[in-house]
Amino acid sequence: MKVLGVSGSPIKNSNTDRALKAVLDATGYETEFVKLTDCTVAPCRACLGCVKTNQCVIKDDGIELAEKAKAADALIIAGFTPYSTIDSRTKAFIERLYPLRHTHGFMAGKPGGAVITSSVPQGNDMLPPACQMGINAIQFYMMEEGMNFVGAVHIQGNVPCVTCGLGDKCKMTGITMLYGPDATVDSVGIKSFEEQPVAVDAAKELGCKVAEALETK
Ligand SMILES: Cc1cc2nc3c(=O)[nH]c(=O)nc-3n(C[C@H](O)[C@H](O)[C@H](O)COP(=O)(O)O)c2cc1C
């Protein structure tokens, strides 16, 4: 049994990456972690060139990644939410799994899960539901392919304005937009996955649920 984890986060050793690795570790199975910034994956061209061959016609790393997904027994997809939806690398990766669909449904029945980092604080209904949008993109892919979506992990991520150097001076700062008019770089601070017990527990739980689903598959 092998569990594949794919991260679309471009930041080195990011919250998203570390949370995904925590999920993979919690499965107890052999795992592989793939970072999409190490790969070249163009979006689907909707040419339907994969229909008869179950292989994409675009000659980049998307072909090997689809083969890895096909060979894996479970798949965890991790991404972040620029402009309130799933990041483009993760989306392109998902689209390039389309060749696995035709006739065979190679992903059907496999357990799957999602890891999403977003910087919109939980519980503020006035802001776009970035986390849910990210989860939906992954969950709906898995549902449409007949996979067994077993759960999601949300990590409270960093507003880029906290580290950009202009945070408290820029009129476009996201800090006050997300955290209120009195928020500052210092009051918001750096968010890390390991300091979020709810996310750490959710990562362990997701890994365990994937393992349970594999045992009963
Ligand atoms: C261009 C850009 C736009 C962003 N827009 C949003 C957004 O609309 N909603 C949100 O929740 N986070 C947004 N973010 C923040 C990311 O979700 C945040 O940087 C995330 O913590 C990155 O995760 P990582 O550290 O695991 O890579 C944006 C980040 C970037 C770079």
Image: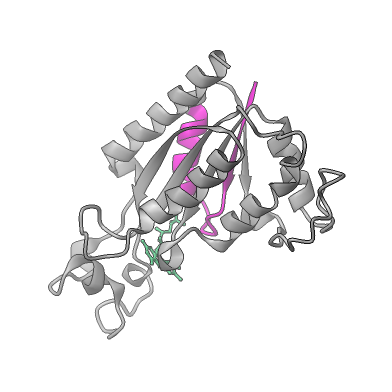
Give the magenta range. Answer: 1-25
Q: Quadrant of ligand 1?
A: bottom left
Residue at position x 35%, y 76% in the image: 165
Residue 82, given in percent of the width and then of the height, sits at 45, 65
Left or right of residue 210, residue 121 in this image? left
For the residue pair 13 and 211, the one nearer the viewer reads as 211
- Residue 113, position in %: x, y? 49, 37
Which residue is outermost to the front?
A: 103
Does 3 lie within the magenta span? yes
Q: Is 167 placed above or below 52 here?
A: below
Side of 181 where 30 appears, left or right: right
Quadrant showing the N terminus: top right
Taking depth in this image into account, of 167 and 46 the one nearest to the observer is 46
Instruction: Pinpoint residue 53: horizontal percent, then vertical percent.
Output: 87, 44
| Identity of the residue furthest to the left in this view | 182
Would residue 25 appear left or right of 170 to someone viewing this image?
right
Which of 66 and 146 lies nearest the eye of the viewer?
A: 146
